[in-house]
Image (cartoon, grey):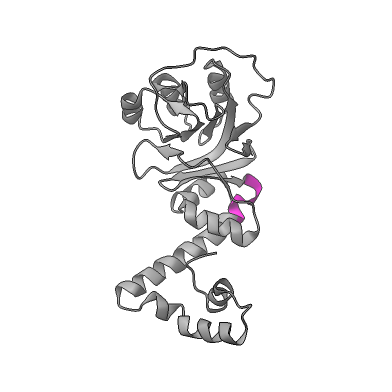
C-alpha cells in the first residue's frame, strides 16, 4: 500500500479498530501513555513517526523537522516530565509549514491558544507555561528513536491518534493492520445499523447459542464464538 493511500485508509479508522486488528494479527499493541490527549476533540493524527529526544533545547526539533518528509508525525520524548513544557507555538508552526501532520509529546506543551489557532494535531500530557530551564548533554542518537512511556518509537513506526489515545504500528505491518481494521470497522458499523433497526446485539451475536456451546464445552470463549459467526465487539 502506497504512503498516500495508507494515510487515507487510516484517516477513516479509529484507534480501537486498529488495536483490535493488532491483537488479531498477533502484533504487540503499543500505546502512548494514558493521558496523552489532543488539544481539541475530534482530532485525528496519522503519519510515519519522526522521533526526537529533548534535552533542553528546541534545536533537536528543528533538526528532526528538517529530516522529516511531508506526512510525518513528530514524536517528542521528554521523558514524561511534568516540570517543563518543551513544545510551543513556533515549533508547532514550523512543523505545520514543513508539511508534518502532527506532534505527539511524551511531556507537556505550552502556548495553547496559539496552538489551537495553528490547528496542527498535537497530543501531550498537558500544558504548563514554563519552558526548559536546563540544557543536558545530548545523546548522539536523539534523532533515531524516542520513548513514549515504555515504548521505543522509530521511523519504522506508523502513528495513529484520536480521542481514545495514540497507537504505534510497525510500518512494515501497517497495511496488513489497516486491512483487518477496515473489516472490523465495517462489521461493527453494520451491526450498529441493524441495532438501530431493532435487531439487538444479543440476537446478532447469538448469545443463546454461545451459552449452549459453552455449556457443552466450558473451554469455548465468546471470542471464538464471535469469529465463528463473523461478529465483532471484542478481540
Locate residue 42: give its quadrant: top left
Q: Does the magenta stretch include residue 61?
A: no
In the rendered image, which quarter is residue 220 located in? bottom right
- Please report the residue visible at 59 percent of the width from the left and 53 percent of the height from the top: 175
Give x and y (percent) for residue 149: 57, 37
Magenta segment's dominant SS is helix
- Identify the residue at horizontal 57%, vertical 82% (top origin): 214
Viewed as shown, does residue 172 lie left or right of 49?
Answer: right
Is residue 7 visible from the viewing direction of this image?
A: yes
Q: Give the range drawn in magenta.
A: 171-176
Judged from this view, the residue extending furthest toward the right is: 140
Q: Residue at x 55, y 31 (%)?
A: 69
| Residue 206 visible | no
Residue 163 is situated, as x and y percent measured from the top left of the image, at 40, 46
Side (left or right) of 29 relative to 11:
right
Q: Which of 233 and 75 is in front in this view?
A: 233
Amino acid at each position: 500500500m502506497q504512503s498516500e493511500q495508507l494515510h487515507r485508509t487510516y484517516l477513516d479508522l479509529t484507534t480501537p479498530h486498529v488495536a483490535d486488528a493488532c491483537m488479531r494479527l498477533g502484533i504487540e499493541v503499543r500505546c502512548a501513555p494514558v493521558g496523552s490527549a489532543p488539544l481539541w476533540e475530534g482530532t485525528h493524527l496519522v503519519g510515519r513517526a519522526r522521533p526526537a529526544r529533548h534535552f533542553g533545547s528546541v534545536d533537536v526539533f528543528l533538526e528532526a523537522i528538517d529530516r522529516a518528509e511531508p506526512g510525518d508525525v513528530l514524536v517528542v520524548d521528554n521523558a514524561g516530565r511534568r516540570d517543563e513544557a518543551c513544545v510551543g507555538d513556533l515549533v508547532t508552526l514550523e512543523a505545520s509549514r514543513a508539511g508534518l501532520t502532527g506532534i505527539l509529546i511524551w511531556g507537556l506543551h505550552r502556548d495553547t491558544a496559539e496552538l489551537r489557532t495553528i490547528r496542527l494535531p498535537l497530543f501531550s500530557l498537558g500544558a504548563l507555561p514554563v519552558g526548559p530551564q536546563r540544557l543536558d548533554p545530548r545523546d548522539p542518537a536523539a534523532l533515531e528513536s524516542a520513548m513514549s512511556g515504555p515504548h521505543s518509537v522509530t521511523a519504522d513506526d506508523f502513528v495513529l491518534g484520536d480521542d481514545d489515545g495514540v497507537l504505534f504500528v510497525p510500518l512494515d505491518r501497517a497495511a496488513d493492520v489497516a486491512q483487518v481494521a477496515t473489516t472490523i470497522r465495517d462489521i461493527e458499523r453494520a451491526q450498529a445499523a441493524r441495532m438501530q433497526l431493532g435487531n439487538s446485539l444479543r440476537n446478532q451475536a447469538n448469545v443463546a447459542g454461545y451459552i449452549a456451546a459453552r455449556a457443552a464445552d466450558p473451554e469455548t470463549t465468546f471470542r471464538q464464538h464471535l469469529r465463528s459467526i463473523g461478529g465483532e465487539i471484542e478481540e
